[in-house]
Image (spheres, grey):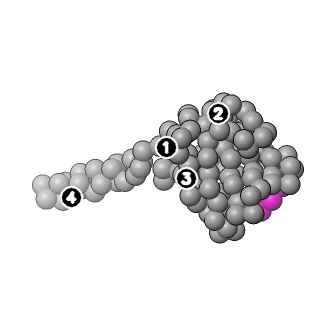
Amino acid sequence: MSRSALVLAVLALAGRARAAEPAAPAPNVAATFGNTVVSVYPDGRSQKVWIQPDGNWTGLSRKGTPLAGHWFLKDGKVCLRQSRPPTLPISFCQALPVDMAKGVDSRDVLGTPIHLRLVKGISENPG
């Protein structure tokens, strides 16, 4: 193998190794552990989600229906995949609030504008 071919091969492998590194740092999802993430909808109703460190989450829909699933990190966002009640096999990713004093404006899976806020403790009341 010629020297130039060897250099090209090394550069190609180095490029692949760099591409495998995460593109964005993981969000501070730990701030949500032991607290309640509240999604407030334009009609005033809210959905609550509790994220556990083991990769699971539980919640209550706007109608009070129990929810559950798994979460993972992707591209600097927290992605939720619902398993209870069963839904389409999709994941929904968004940035979550990490500061109790500030919320995050976002959209839900259907595109409805929502305001996400972090409430101290495990609270079923959006208070």
Question: Amino acid type of disc 2?
Answer: Lys
In the picture, measured across the screen, residue 84 lies left or right of residue 49, that is right
| Residue 56 is inside the magenta segment | no
Identify the mark nearer the N-term, 2 or 4: 4
The tag on residue 8 is 4
Image location of residue 32, percent across then percent down: 60, 37
Residue placed under numbered mark 2 in the picture: 120
Furthest toward the bottom, the residue is 111
Question: Amino acid type of disc 1?
Answer: Pro
Image location of residue 84, percent across then percent down: 83, 49
Q: Secondary structure at mark 1?
A: loop
Q: Is residue 2 visible?
A: no
The tag on residue 104 is 3
Residue shown at 78%/40% (left/top)? 125
Question: Amino acid type of disc 4?
Answer: Leu
The tag on residue 27 is 1
Q: CA distance from mark 4 to mark 1?
A: 36 Å
Q: Secondary structure at mark 4?
A: helix
Q: CA distance from mark 2 to mark 3?
A: 16 Å
Please say if the residues under marks 2 and 3 sit with CB atoms less than 8 Å apart: no
| Label 1: how many Cα within 10 Å (few below 14, some 14–19, many 20+) | some
